[in-house]
Amino acid sequence: MQLLKIIIKSLKFDKQVYLQAKNNPGFLRSSLLIVLLVSLCTGIGTINLTNDSSIIRDLLSSIIGWLIWTLIIFLIGVKVMKNSATFSQLARTLGLAYSPGVLNIFGLLHFISIPLLAITSIWTIISFIYALKHALEISAERAFLISLLSFIPYILFRSLLFLL
């Protein structure tokens, strides 16, 4: 029940839940569960769009992708751009930003699966920018720039993972 409350708050861009995630090491479990839940919901919701489905591969890919994207953001946002946050703070906060993906389960309704994926993808990107804004305590514009710069290597990495 607590996880559901966290997901709803993050979907509503509740600043407090993002700040709690940043400042509370106990949120790492919730962030990991959200990433896993989103992976499952996306896998189930897109089953009618693909012939290739491996739950284990998808779960591992999601966890690795989350950690890699967090690492890329850490390198760009903290090491290069000199903002302040630990890797763990970023991982916890960015894990919450995956929350819109839980709605992908409704992709089982074939007629909405593609528009739904588009909406949740855009919502997730906006959530990432919002999470970065609070994790790094920076402007939305700077968070957007870091998100954009990190997205390109992240997509390349995910594409390589998908090919395996």
Image: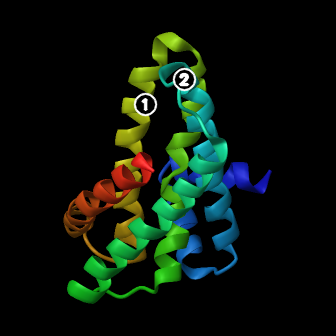
Q: Which residue is mark 1?
A: 117
Residue at x 46% of width, y 60% of height: 65
Q: In the rendered structure, which disc, 2 or 1, sits on the residue that comes first in sequence?
A: 2
74 or 60, which lies in front?
60
Residue at x 70% of width, y 77% of height: 26
Q: Quadrant of residue 150?
A: bottom left
The picture places residue 81, in percent across and down from the top left corner, at 21, 84
Q: Is residue 134 left or right of residue 24?
A: left
The picture places residue 82, in percent across and down from the top left corner, at 25, 89
The picture places residue 72, in percent across and down from the top left corner, at 33, 73
Give the class, few, some or many, for how many residues have Cα within 10 Å of label 1's Cα (few <14, many ≥20). Answer: many
Residue placed farthest to the front in the image? 164
41 or 94, which lies in front?
41
Labelled disc at residue 13: none
Q: How are the residues colored?
A: rainbow
In what element is the residue under mark 1? helix
Residue at x 63% of width, y 80% of height: 24
Q: Is residue 161 left or right of residue 145?
A: right
Residue at x 48% of width, y 22% of height: 49
Q: Looking at the picture, does residue 113 appear above or below residue 119?
A: above
Q: Is residue 87 left or right of residue 58?
A: left
User: Label 2 is placed on what type of residue?
Assistant: Gly
Quote the CA–CA distance across marks 2 and 1.
8 Å
Q: Is residue 18 left or right of residue 40?
A: left
Q: Quadrant of residue 153?
A: bottom left
In what element is the residue under mark 2? helix
Asked whether residue 119 is in view, the answer is: yes
Q: Looking at the picture, does residue 102 appear above or below residue 87?
A: above
Q: Which residue is mark 2?
A: 107
- Mark 2 vs 1: CB contact within 8 A: yes
